[in-house]
Image: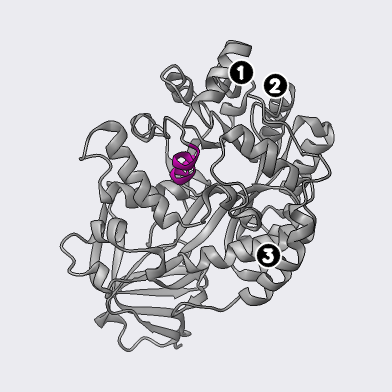
């Protein structure tokens, strides 16, 4: 009996690989065979010459690598890109962002999510972890456009028990949806907006239902110092005493993690990960960054992220990869850390682990989900290639991504989006902006006072 054709065969590329020691390597003149949403094999171009396929991609001059993962963002906030510039954190929240977010409708969230997903597909992002409001709309966009996502409905204690219950209901209803491309988490906003009682109840719900938790904590050093002054404990210690560190948790930012937090994180009995979004920290003028090296020494994965485009102006994880490497060299005073290969490891396997998908994503190997991007290295800014890892991290750009594939489905081919119509989204979003941006009502969804 003749085997049915493969769904996709990619030939002539260089494939980014991980060995059994999790070191980054490259296989030249290689081929990838994709069947039923999975990588069936990583082989040579010659070996697949006569293999039938529904779609063949000639990828000479390109690198095939696992799709990038945006480990913490607020996708719909692209609608606020550039509206709160050059402000300290407190004014950014209280004077601009939280008043505007009190206007948000589900339609605004949907349009923002559409634009964000288009941006991420074009930048080689195949999965994103989102933490926002009206997340049913985001889930619907993910289902339609073909991306993978780890979603949580955010809540504050000021909403009462209803906020927590809505977050749970969303997580249970959407877990495993979009053909398995959506995973879910409980999403308390942060220890400074969610009290200990709610955090403890969240941890209990996570244990009961087998869910993870995605929240902001120790975002910056000011938050840690304010928590110590008011409560005598750090935000990380609050997560420990409320049981959040006893379940699987993704902590956004962590630039306020201090030395006394490290043994607390080391004792965590749940799977703990941190997402770093360095561009925003530079914009806010924060004095510290995510302590990637200290977390690495504890075996805690650090995933790459962008945060929302209201603070970061971009959903470019490629830039986050390069910035993470550069800032780590600067803050540690050690040019040997982070290497380009280490940066690629953060962008692939560590990011997959951060969002709880380390067993299915993060490396191109048989049995893994076929989330693949093809990166064109024929441009003048990427030639000649002396060190392929360095070329990818420090010379290539997200705009060099030619093709984006999720679960074996091609979402972008030769820079052309196949599942989203950007001009119509932009037109509709522009019509809604005056009502969205109105701050004359004097409301805000929360107060930033850490």
Dot 2 and dot 3 residues touching (CB under 8 Å): no
Q: Secondary structure at mark 1?
A: helix
Dot 1 and dot 2 residues touching (CB under 8 Å): yes
Q: Which mark is residue 241?
A: 1
The C terminus appears in which quarter of the rendering? top right
Q: Secondary structure at mark 2?
A: helix
Q: Is residue 274 magenta?
A: no
Q: Which mark is residue 196?
A: 2
Residue drawn 33% across and 48% down?
343
Which residue is disc 3 drawn over? 141
| 113 or 204: nearer the viewer | 113
Q: Position of residue 70 (x, y in %)?
A: 50, 52
In the image, taking residue 89 as reference, residue 396 lies left or right, namely left
In the image, taking residue 430 as reference, residue 73 lies left or right, namely left
Magenta segment's dominant SS is helix
Q: Is residue 276 magenta?
A: yes
How many residues crowd mark 2 within 10 Å: few (<14), some (14–19), many (20+)? some
C-alpha separation, residue under disc 1 versus residue under disc 2: 8 Å
């Amino acid at each position: 009996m003749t085997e049915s054709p493969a769904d996709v065969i990619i030939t002539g590329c260089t494939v980014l690989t991980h060995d059994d020691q999790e070191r980054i390597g490259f296989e030249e003149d290689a081929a990838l065979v994709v069947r039923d949403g999975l990588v069936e094999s990583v082989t040579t171009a010659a070996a697949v010459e006569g293999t039938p396929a529904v779609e063949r991609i000639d990828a000479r001059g390109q690198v095939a690598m696992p799709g990038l993962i945006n480990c913490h963002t607020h996708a719909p906030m692209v609608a606020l890109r550039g509206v709160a510039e050059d402000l300290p954190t407190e004014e950014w929240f209280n004077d601009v962002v939280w008043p505007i977010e009190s206007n948000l409708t589900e339609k605004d969230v949907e349009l923002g999510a559409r634009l964000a997903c288009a941006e991420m597909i074009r930048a080689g992002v195949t999965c994103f972890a989102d933490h926002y409001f009206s997340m049913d709309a985001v889930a619907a966009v993910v289902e339609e456009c073909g991306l993978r996502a780890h979603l949580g409905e955010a809540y504050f204690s000021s909403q009462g028990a209803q906020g927590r219950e809505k977050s749970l209901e969303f997580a249970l209803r959407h877990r495993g949806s979009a053909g398995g491309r959506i995973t879910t988490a409980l999403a308390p906003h942060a220890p400074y907006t969610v009290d200990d009682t709610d955090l403890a109840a969240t941890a209990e719900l996570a244990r009961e239902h087998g869910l993870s938790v995605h929240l902001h904590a120790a975002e910056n050093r000011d938050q840690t110092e304010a928590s110590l002054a008011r409560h005598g404990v750090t935000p990380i210690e609050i997560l420990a005493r409320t049981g959040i560190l006893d379940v699987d948790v993704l902590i956004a930012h962590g630039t306020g993690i201090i030395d006394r937090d490290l043994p607390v994180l080391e004792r965590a009995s749940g799977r703990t990960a941190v997402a770093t979004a360095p561009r925003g920290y530079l914009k806010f003028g924060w004095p510290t960054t995510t302590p990637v090296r200290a977390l690495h020494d504890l075996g805690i994965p650090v995933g790459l992220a962008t945060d929302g485009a209201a603070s970061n102006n971009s959903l470019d994880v490629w830039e986050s990869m390069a910035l993470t490497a550069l800032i780590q060299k600067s803050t540690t005073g050690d040019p040997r850390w982070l290497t380009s290969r280490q940066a690629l490891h953060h962008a692939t396997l560590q990011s997959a682990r951060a969002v709880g998908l380390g067993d299915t994503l993060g490396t191109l190997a048989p049995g893994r989900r076929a989330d693949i991007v093809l990166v064109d290295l024929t441009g003048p800014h990427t030639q000649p290639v002396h060190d392929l890892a360095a070329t990818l991290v420090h010379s290539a750009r997200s705009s060099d991504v030619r093709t984006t594939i999720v679960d074996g489905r091609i979402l972008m081919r030769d820079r052309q989006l196949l599942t989203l119509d950007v001009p119509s989204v932009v037109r509709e979003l522009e019509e809604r902006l005056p009502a969205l941006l109105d701050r004359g009502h004097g409301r805000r969804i929360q107060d930033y006072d850490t």
